[in-house]
Amino acid sequence: MCGICGTTAASDFSHVARMSAALVHRGPDDDGIFLDEPSGVGLAVRRLSIIDLDGGHQPIQNEDGTVTVVFNGEIYNFGLLREHLLKRGHRLATRTDTEVLVHLYEEYGDELLHAVDGMYAFALWDSKQRRLLLARDRFGEKPLFYAERAGALAFASELTALAAGGVCSWELDPKAVDEYFTFGYLSAPGSIVRGVRQLPPGHLLAWTREGGSSLRPYWKPPPHAPRLAGSIAELVDETEALLTSSVRSRLVADVPVGVFLSGGVDSTLLTALAARETAQLRTFTVTYDTGSVSESDPARRSAELVGADHRELVFTAKDVERHFARYVTALDQPLADEALVPLRAVSEFARSDVTVAVGGEGADEVFGGYPRYRWLARSALLDRWLPTVVRGPLAVGASRALVGRARRLGTVLEPIPISHRHLGWVTGQRVGLRTTLYGPRLMEHAHRIPEDGLPAAGTNGPVEGVLMRLDQEHWLPGDVLAKADRASMQVSLELRTPYLSRELVEFAATVPPATHVQGGGKLLLRRVLQRVLPDAAFRRAKTAFRTPTAEWLRGPLAPALREHLASSSLYTDGWFDRDAVRRLADEHATRRADHGSTLWPLFVLGVWLDAR
């Protein structure tokens, strides 16, 4: 795990050295710089040593020094790839996974990506062809930003490195601010600042000085099968075998490894499978002294069942007050997912014991775990059964209810296209608040429907499958995996995700979506858990590292929120309407309403922006 950066306009080492210094948190163990003076290409890397601690120094080259790579991530099948390359006559000087890339490129060129299973972003310089290749893993577990200006290309793992190298400023892109407020995150290819793009997941970018850059995909999430192939028992067998293999590969390291355990199905299953592979498993969870979303009891029970050495962090209201601003301002671009805070805290807590952690990211998107898949599929059926004149009044009545299921029913019954129901659900209805809350700098975007959050034109098939694939392409890389990467790498911890094995994901797509969402969702994972750890296969509502956000905004963060509303450049510079937001904050503080899902993204953005 590392941070990488580079430019095609380097006259000396100083340019890339400045960018590299901004990435030290991603790789505190080692650093390296490569400069090809005739071409002006400079590459740099900060290394967090995981595999081949002594021999994995980067950049790494092939035998004659004509191919050079800097790499961020892990290649889980590098052992097999290494054997294959040795049989074909290549000489490998190290045991690190990075080295297989330069030799795979010699053999297969850009097609090397089809052989690699892992999480990664890398840059490869071919001095013979005078060609730079950038690539990002299939789901976007590892970030990569780039900017092209005056024929030159610069790239880095984080925006902060590009800013440190003078490649970009912190001038916000209004369209990106609109997208951030609406969704709470930014999907590739956009970024929060003007002139910088994210390399999309599953894409590669090739650059030459003569031809500039060209971008193309090498992988996309596959569509779901329309019919069930095989029995449920056979599908459970295959799920267990593939997930076991994936967990095993993600435990390979020359440093201590642990598991983030919330006590839900995803993390409990990973813990049970990991316990089969190692005798000294460490697990970590986070709980709170505020609110009612603690996961400590189920997490502790799951750890006891497998005999894990369990560690529990109590993240107090005082901790929130002390660390919120530090966590937010450390981000290279804002992210409104409240779970970033506890994930960052538990990552810091775990880092004293382990260098690598395994997490359950991706399980919901791949195996159909989110309740909205089922609810919105039901709404599609109701569209056929109930006329609009009936659905409208029922939706109004249900939406006024205070309890969750009734409010969900209001979303299901609302007489609007299902794609817009989905948009309202995933944005916490913020999409409809923009005309009220936006200031003059954003108002031109207030009436635009953000198409990035809607299914592509012509998309068809079962509603559950359409939404699962949409999440795999947008929500998963833009929010879930960005959160995991930033929260862990800010404290130099590598977070691995077994549910995103390519083989496992492609297998899951052979299962009809309606099968995945049976029994409350994640049917196959629940069945596997019943096999490997029967005593833990209890029925629980979906959980994760949830947060008592509403209580935080009324309690420990209330003074900072008031100060933010009074002085943040978010309002003084005309991005948002201060009075309109203040009214929401007053209603929230006096418990007349819960506006946490609106106030949180604004608070995060303002604190982040004021620190730039």
Image (cartoon, helix red, strand yellow):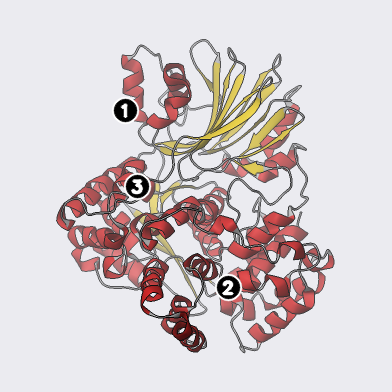
- Sooner in the amino-acid sequence: mark 2 or mark 3: 2
Q: CA distance from mark 2 to mark 3?
A: 30 Å
Q: Is residue 372 above or below residue 131?
A: below
- Sooner in the amino-acid sequence: mark 3 or mark 1: 1
Q: Is residue 505 left or right of residue 443?
A: left
Q: Are marks 3 and 1 in contact (CB under 8 Å)?
A: no
Q: Nearer the viewer, mark 3 or mark 1?
A: 3
- Disc 1: which residue: 80
**Could you tell me which secondary element the residue under label 3 belongs to?**
helix
- Disc 2: which residue: 429
The quadrant where residue 378 appears = bottom left
Residue at 65% over, 89% down: 590
Q: CA distance from mark 3 to mark 1?
A: 20 Å
Q: Is residue 58 left or right of residue 610?
A: left
Give neighbour class at mark 1: few <14, some 14-19, many 20+ (Cα, 10 Å): few
Q: Nearer the viewer, mark 2 or mark 1?
A: 2
- Disc 3: which residue: 505
Could you say where residue 357 lies in the image, as x and y percent from the top left? 42, 50
Could you say where residue 589 lies in the image, as x and y percent from the top left? 66, 84
Q: Is residue 289 above or below residue 445?
A: below
Q: Is residue 47 above or below residue 311?
A: above
The three-letter code of the residue at mark 3 reads Val
The three-letter code of the residue at mark 2 reads Gln
Q: Is residue 504 above or below residue 596?
A: above
Q: Is residue 267 left or right of residue 294?
A: left
The residue lying toward the viewer, choosing from 215 and 480, is 215
The three-letter code of the residue at mark 1 reads Leu
The quadrant where residue 514 appears = bottom left
Could you say where residue 224 lies in the image, as x and y percent from the top left? 33, 51
